């Protein structure tokens, strides 16, 4: 079981999305331009660790959310906003949502997110 | 015959400015137990819920469907639903039923069943249950930081003060939506200026809110609103699935999310479908759990005055907080909008969350005065901060705040305003003037702030967003301008995005950057001696309000002129019939120098002597050493008096006129309320004593009755009397004295 909080108990296993070790996130590095906002993001690996912690605490739905988040970590912000907007009432068609789901699955291996979108297409579109 | 003047007086009271109505179930204007609420039921087929609360799957609306698919643990649903509701309710107040067991059981219940369980609890039982069931052991608090003029220096100063006062989260919002990036920026800078490291958010439209968070200008979001009927949900421009997706989107960037719901919103929107507010709120909370949110802010939030207009409204709001906790969600328990005009009613309502403790007792305590709060006033605001700190001290309850002293507050406000000024300059935003900085430090409200160029600010805000200015730009600007400590602290919080630690339930960031959540600080309450207790350090912090005086220093203040009564031998009985003895207490003109009101003993003694002499008699001063009781002092004096009349006076100023033949606790006149005695009263007391000696008719000295005197002076009275009693020497007879004006 991962040791929580990760930042305190297992910083050696944390990395930024660009592969920098957690310990290298310093003010010096920010000032030197070695750290940008893109580095200050969680990775799918850290999200999976957090999901395991949540699951072990009996929080099945939170764990599922964190695993969906792990899938979305690689999805660009613009694409995320498109999908979110398509899920809002009266925006997307059933077919449009299904296509978004397939795209997420194929390009980002985002199976859980795809399942959520398909469910929305069946239930609320 | 006219009306009652007492009814007229009450009609003018603040509580009667609140609105009250009877129930109207058909429109949802009923807090709990609508006759149209469904009865609990569940049917499961092949691991799938095919009927819930009397509705077959084919008739499910979007909330039913989402709840059935995501919120209910099918594995235990049948067993949990079959458990007697009263038995479940008793688990909530049974210290032998641990939180984890209750959470497991409630995971299998439908909305109607949960409402049925809660129905049997009164508010005290609900408070006991909330104490056990909130997710994080340590309670905390969230602040609202806004102002009407959207002044960035004032926002930063207020944010810094909030953190100095112990708030763990800061929420800002906008009057004009386009201000959002600048407001978020100002609050971010302020949040890292005080002692702590608060998380920050800016409540705006979902899409813009996400953008601000991704840019690192905020670290959490709580605007994900959920409604309890399909129509209300759609009017909110979302579905449970879009909200669930949005929650994952935030988490994918390491941003904390809390949903929002609350009783009354569906009725307000005209879509309550004849269901009770609590039933609909339970559906919201189950949808929130199903979406995988770690928590919720509820407690009616901005609708609070609507449930409060109905019978059971305040109980209903506590019930919704409790249900959120039972569903294992972090609870930010409301108290963020004006709940009443009446201070009594507002404070009474607060106690329901304050005493049991919540993950965040307020989902927005207004650290500014009400007129600057853009969220709806705040049930408590800047003017109530001393009250709040004193309530913590009174109850020994942790409401998440710490008393702050003015010099420290001014210092962090100044630094935050300077930091904003520097960052605005570095990032080529419209300048923050020196006058704005100075005004922000000492302002009561934004009325005290110089006007800014709104057009230029809005233009710059738009440009800021277009260019994608972000948290790292802010950190660099701060460090370049000598605010390295603030830069470091912002980075410390941003760094936690990489670990995702504050995505866990009920997370907050402690001063120093350590994350505390329901994982490493789980609520383990199981009765007295368990769960959250004030540590010795925390109790000392709560107790040390700046208003508290050092009791040892009370009464030690010098008086002018000072009086020194030297004891020159045992006092003999006088034999002159025109002599009045003035018997003073053991500390009079010694370790104590002034009365309760601060009248110097020298002047008091002069006034008494003057009064006696005005009526042609002489006064002899003796000091009583064997007692500090006023009656006994006067009685002892009377035994020594040639006329048989004495004035007894304690150091605190309480005075009696006594006669030799009376019982010690009897008297001719007693003046127990020293605060109402002036030098003039002492002179009249002297005259009256002389008149008693001459057996002339005496008009008693008029005494004012002030029922607040005890409230105002009991502490000083106690301490002065303690100090007098310390000087008692039971073996020492009354002493002749010589006055020396030292």
Image: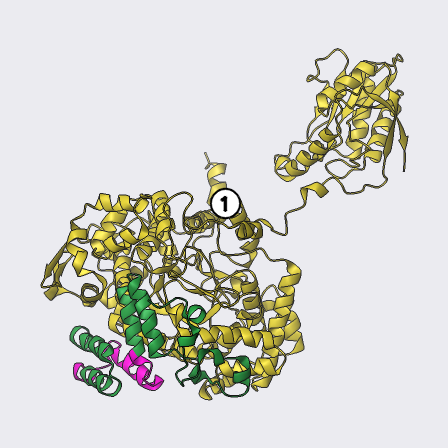
Chain colours: A green, B yellow
According to the picture, the residue beneath numbered tag 1 turns out to be B395
The x and y percentages for residue B135 are 36, 57
Which residue is rendered at x = 22% and y = 84% of the image? A105
Give the residue displayed 71% in from the left and 35% down from the top: B720
Q: Is residue B643 left or right of residue A115?
A: right
* Residue A82 magenta: yes
* Residue B362, picture quadrant: bottom left
What is the quadrant of the N terminus of chain A in the image?
bottom left
Residue B451 visible in image: no
Q: Is residue B120 left or right of residue B177?
A: left
Describe the element under mark 1 as helix, strand or loop: helix
User: Which residue of the protein is positioned furthest toward the left in this rendering?
Assistant: B45
- Name the foreground residue: B449 vs B665: B665
Residue A108, horizontal then vertical, whole percent: 26, 85
Q: Residues within 10 Å of mark 1 (few under 14, many from 20)?
A: few
Q: Is residue B545 visible?
A: yes
Residue B90, above or below A69: above
Indicate the quadrant where residue A122 lies: bottom left
Q: Position of residue B309 (x, y in %)?
A: 36, 51
Answer above or below: position of B366 versus A31: above
Task: Give the quadrant of the C terminus of chain A.
Answer: bottom left
Front residue of B573 and B255: B255
> Can residue B384 be found in the magenta stretch?
no
Q: Which residues are magenta?
A: A71-96
């Amino acid at each position: 079981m991962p040791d929580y909080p990760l930042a305190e108990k297992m910083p050696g296993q944390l990395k930024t999305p660009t592969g920098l070790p957690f310990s290298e996130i310093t003010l010096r590095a920010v000032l030197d331009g070695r750290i940008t906002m893109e580095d200050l993001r969680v990775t799918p690996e850290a999200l999976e660790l957090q999901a395991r912690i949540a699951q072990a605490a009996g929080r099945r739905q939170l764990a599922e959310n964190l695993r969906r988040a792990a899938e979305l970590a690689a999805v660009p912000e613009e694409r995320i906003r498109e999908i979110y907007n398509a899920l809002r009432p009266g925006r997307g068609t059933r077919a449009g949502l299904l296509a978004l789901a397939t795209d997420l699955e194929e390009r980002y291996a985002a199976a859980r997110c795809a399942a959520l979108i398909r469910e929305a297409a069946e239930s609320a579109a | 015959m006219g009306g009652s003047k007492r009814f007229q007086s009450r009609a003018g009271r603040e509580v009667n400015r609140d609105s009250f109505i009877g129930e109207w179930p058909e429109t949802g204007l009923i807090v709990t137990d609508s006759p149209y609420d469904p009865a609990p039921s569940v049917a499961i087929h092949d691991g799938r819920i095919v009927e819930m609360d009397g509705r077959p799957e084919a008739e499910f609306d979007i909330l039913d469907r989402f709840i059935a698919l995501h919120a209910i643990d099918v594995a235990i649903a049948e067993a949990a639903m079959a458990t007697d509701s009263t038995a479940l309710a008793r688990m909530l107040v049974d210290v032998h039923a641990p939180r984890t067991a209750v959470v497991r059981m409630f995971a299998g219940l439908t909305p109607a069943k949960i409402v049925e369980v809660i129905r049997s609890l009164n508010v005290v039982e609900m408070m006991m249950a909330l104490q056990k069931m909130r997710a994080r052991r340590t309670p905390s608090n969230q602040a609202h930081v806004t102002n009407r003029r959207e002044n960035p220096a004032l926002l930063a100063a207020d944010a810094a003060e909030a953190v100095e006062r112990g708030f763990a989260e800061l929420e800002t919002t906008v009057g004009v939506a386009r201000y959002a990036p600048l407001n978020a920026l100002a609050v971010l800078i302020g949040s890292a200026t005080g002692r702590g490291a608060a998380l920050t958010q800016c409540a705006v439209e979902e899409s813009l809110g996400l953008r601000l968070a991704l840019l690192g200008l905020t670290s959490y979001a709580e605007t994900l609103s959920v409604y309890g009927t399909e129509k209300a949900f759609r009017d909110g421009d979302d579905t449970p699935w879009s909200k669930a997706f949005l929650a994952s989107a935030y988490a994918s960037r390491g941003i904390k999310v809390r949903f929002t719901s609350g009783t009354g919103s569906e009725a307000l929107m005209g879509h309550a479908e004849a269901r009770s507010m609590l039933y609909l709120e339970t559906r919201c909370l189950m949808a929130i759990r199903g979406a995988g949110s770690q928590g919720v802010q509820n407690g009616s939030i901005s609708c609070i005055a609507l449930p409060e207009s109905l019978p059971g409204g305040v109980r209903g709001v506590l019930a919704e907080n409790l249900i959120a906790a039972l569903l294992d969600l972090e609870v930010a328990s409301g108290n963020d909008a004006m709940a009443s005009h009446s201070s009594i009613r507002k404070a009474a309502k607060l106690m329901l969350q304050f005493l049991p403790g919540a993950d965040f007792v307020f989902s927005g305590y207004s650290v500014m005065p009400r007129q600057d709060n853009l969220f709806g006033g705040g049930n408590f605001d800047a003017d109530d901060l001393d009250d709040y700190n004193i309530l913590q001290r009174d109850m020994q309850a942790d409401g998440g705040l710490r008393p702050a002293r003015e010099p420290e507050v001014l210092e962090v406000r100044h630094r935050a305003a300077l930091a904003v000024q520097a960052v605005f300059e570095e990032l080529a935003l419209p300048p923050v003037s020196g006058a704005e900085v100075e005004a922000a430090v000492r302002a009561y409200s934004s009325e005290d702030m110089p006007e800014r160029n709104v057009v230029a600010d809005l233009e710059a805000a738009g440009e800021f967003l277009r260019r994608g200015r972000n948290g790292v730009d802010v950190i660099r600007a701060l460090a370049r301008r000598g605010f390295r400590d603030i830069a470091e602290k912002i980075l410390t919080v941003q760094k936690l995005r990489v670990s995702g630690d504050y995505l866990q339930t009920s997370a907050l960031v402690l001063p120093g950057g350590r994350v505390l959540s329901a994982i490493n600080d789980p609520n383990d309450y199981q009765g007295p001696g368990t769960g959250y207790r004030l540590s010795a350090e925390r109790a000392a912090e709560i107790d040390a309000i700046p208003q508290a005086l050092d009791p040892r220093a009370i009464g030690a203040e010098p008086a002018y002129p000072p009086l020194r009564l030297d004891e020159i031998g045992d006092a003999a009985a006088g034999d002159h019939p025109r002599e009045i003895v003035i018997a003073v207490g053991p500390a009079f003109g010694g370790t104590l120098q002034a009365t309760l009101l601060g009248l110097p003993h020298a002047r008091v003694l002069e006034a008494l002597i003057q009064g006696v002499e005005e009526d042609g008699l002489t006064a002899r001063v003796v000091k009583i050493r064997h007692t500090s009781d006023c009656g006994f002092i006067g009685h002892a004096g009377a035994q020594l008096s040639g006329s048989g009349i004495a004035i007894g006076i304690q150091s605190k100023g309480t005075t009696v006129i006594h006669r030799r033949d009376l019982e010690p606790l009897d008297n001719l006149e007693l003046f127990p309320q020293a605060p109402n005695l002036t030098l003039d009263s002492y002179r009249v007391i002297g005259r009256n004593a002389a008149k008693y000696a001459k057996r002339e008719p005496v008009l008693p000295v008029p005494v004012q009755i002030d029922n607040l005197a005890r409230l105002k002076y009991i502490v000083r009275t106690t301490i002065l009397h303690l100090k007098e009693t310390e000087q008692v020497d039971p073996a020492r007879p009354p002493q002749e004295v010589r006055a020396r004006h030292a």
